[in-house]
Image: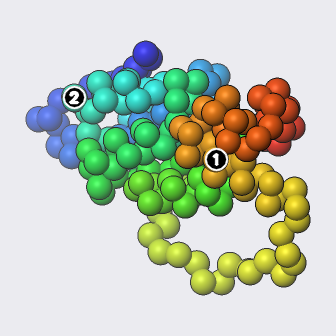
Amino acid sequence: MAIERGPDMDPAEPDAAEELERRLVLVEDDASFVKALRRSFERRGYTVDWCDGLDSVRTLLETVQPGYAVVDLKLGSGSGLECVKELYAHDPDMRIVVLTGFASIATAVEAIKLGACHYLAKPSNTDDIEAAFERTEGDTSVALAGRTTSLKNLEWERIHETLVDTGFNISETARRLGMHRRTLARKLEKKRVP
């Protein structure tokens, strides 16, 4: 369980309330990605804490009140959706953005239902994430798809719906889909976005 805390603040300082509003937690298990993202957010005036899973999020929330969160959907220790649920339950006003290399409609819908304000596919940068924090309403100008969904995309959606239902358990997902575990792992690896 990894928790890395940003610098502590003195509540007597006049900027302490403003600083609390700019406190961000990164929930990500890729340390090199965290290092780059953390540095970028700190340059923009955020105090950044880092957690690598649900247990470390719970521990951090005992002492810290972040106003923002960036959560990776697929964590080594489980689903980022569990972390979204925990963060939202702790503070419904927290601005939570989910990042994923495994984008799907099913996981996007679940993330929003659980309290995320936005859902971004990797690779996303600090500008993208800050813009997502600021979005409070939907965009009616988004173009509707002009063509039917391909068989590959339908398969991909079904795989992700089942992954969400099983808590990202590969073996159980493969069983429910009636395919070999290695076949499912290959499909997931092919679709992975760097």
Query: What's the residue at 29%, 55% (across, down)?
Result: 92
Residue 40 or 162: which is nearer the viewer? 162
Q: CA distance from mark 2 to mark 1?
A: 35 Å
User: Does residue 102 appear anywhere in the picture?
Assistant: no
Q: Residues within 10 Å of mark 1 (few under 14, many from 20)?
A: many
Element class at badge 2: loop
Q: What residue is pinned by disc 1?
A: 162
Query: What's the residue at 47%, 75% (across, down)?
Result: 137
- First along the sequence among labels 2 and 1: 2
Q: Residues within 10 Å of mark 2 (few under 14, many from 20)?
A: few
User: Does residue 93 appear anywhere in the picture?
Assistant: yes
Q: Is residue 74 left or right of residue 55?
A: right
Q: Is residue 93 left or right of residue 128?
A: left
Query: What's the residue at 38%, 46% (across, down)?
Result: 85
Figure check: 40 above or below 118 = above
Q: Quadrant of the N terminus?
A: top left
Image coordinates of residue 70 in percent, x first then y, are 49, 43
Residue 65 or 181: which is nearer the viewer? 181
Q: Quadrant of the C terminus?
A: top right
Q: What residue is pinned by disc 2?
A: 63
Q: Amino acid at mark 1?
A: Thr
Residue 168 image-quadrant placement? top right
Q: Residue placed farthest to the top in the image?
A: 1
Image coordinates of residue 117 in percent, x first then y, are 46, 59
